[in-house]
Amino acid sequence: MKIPFKSVGIMLTKQCTAECDICCFFCSLHKNEKMSKELIVKIIDEAKSVNSISTFGISGGEPFLYLDELLFAISLATKSGFKTTCTTNGFWAVSPKATVEIMMELKKAGLSHLSVSIDEFHLKFVPVDNIKRILKVARQIDLPVFLGSVVTKTSKRLSAISELLGDDLLGFPIVEVPCLPVGRAKEKIKSDSFLYSSQLPAKKCRNMDTIVILPDGSVYPCCSQAGMTSPLLLGSIYNSFKLLNK
């Protein structure tokens, strides 16, 4: 039975300006994996053959380290009929001028919405003023922005993050996501700090409708922090033509 995938996501790179304790991929500036434009074209071409897929997402690592490839992917996916999303830590919003220039490029390329990570862990590497600049410009150019916070029992929660952002947060959605004990988080976060539910899920996993391709071409049917595990590996897009239809 085919899984009705609704979106396809690519991890453009595992390189990142931050080295967060919560990172499930051990991302850092020392990583050098980067997805090629050729692979991006192949993924989008294959995704077009899957009628249920309507959204194309780009994440990392930090995809804004490779702005040319990022804009290329957004533009091509948009022209191919997909809604496009991108996730960032906002390191690039160092000044009002830089923020406007980059966000106007995103809008011109056709980005549907921008997701920005802000929590206790990312704030160790990215000043809150960067996020404020992004929100201010997003309001000016009418670009939807969603904010996400990865949290533990002992980390700053939404009340604290909201207070840091102040009035700049008005009109923008922000959600909490529990940190999972995978990757660097398994080493850096104390076991009793993870948030667990005492009940079994009432519904099927919401992360299983997104197919994700890593820089090396590995394909997984899940976009969760814990989804990139060997039992879920579907194969490689390099040697499995039309893999998205499997």
Image (cartoon, rainbow, N blue to C red):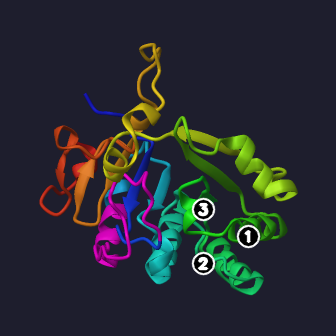
**Total marks placed:** 3
Within 10 angstroms of label 3, few (less than 14), some, or many (20 or more) residues? some
Within 10 angstroms of label 2, few (less than 14), some, or many (20 or more) residues? some
**For residue 27, above or below residue 197:** below
Of 65 and 21, nearer the camera is 21
Mark 2 vs 1: CB contact within 8 A: no
Predominant SS of the magenta segment: loop
Task: Compute the Cα span from label 2 to label 1.
Answer: 11 Å
| Stretch of the chain drawn in magenta | 18-45
Q: Is residue 207 visible?
A: yes
Q: Label 1 sits on what residue type?
A: Asp
Of 119 and 33, nearer the camera is 119
The residue where tag 1 is placed is 129
Secondary structure state at the residue bearing disc 3: helix
Mark 3 vs 2: CB contact within 8 A: no
Task: Compute the Cα span from label 1 to label 3.
Answer: 10 Å
**Numbered badge on residue 222:** none
Residue at the location (36% across, 64% down)?
27
**For residue 11, above or below residue 185:** below
The residue where tag 2 is placed is 92
Residue 43 is inside the magenta segment: yes
Secondary structure state at the residue bearing disc 2: loop
Residue 110 is inside the magenta segment: no
Secondary structure state at the residue bearing disc 1: helix
Within 10 angstroms of label 1, few (less than 14), some, or many (20 or more) residues? some
Q: Label 3 sits on what residue type?
A: Leu
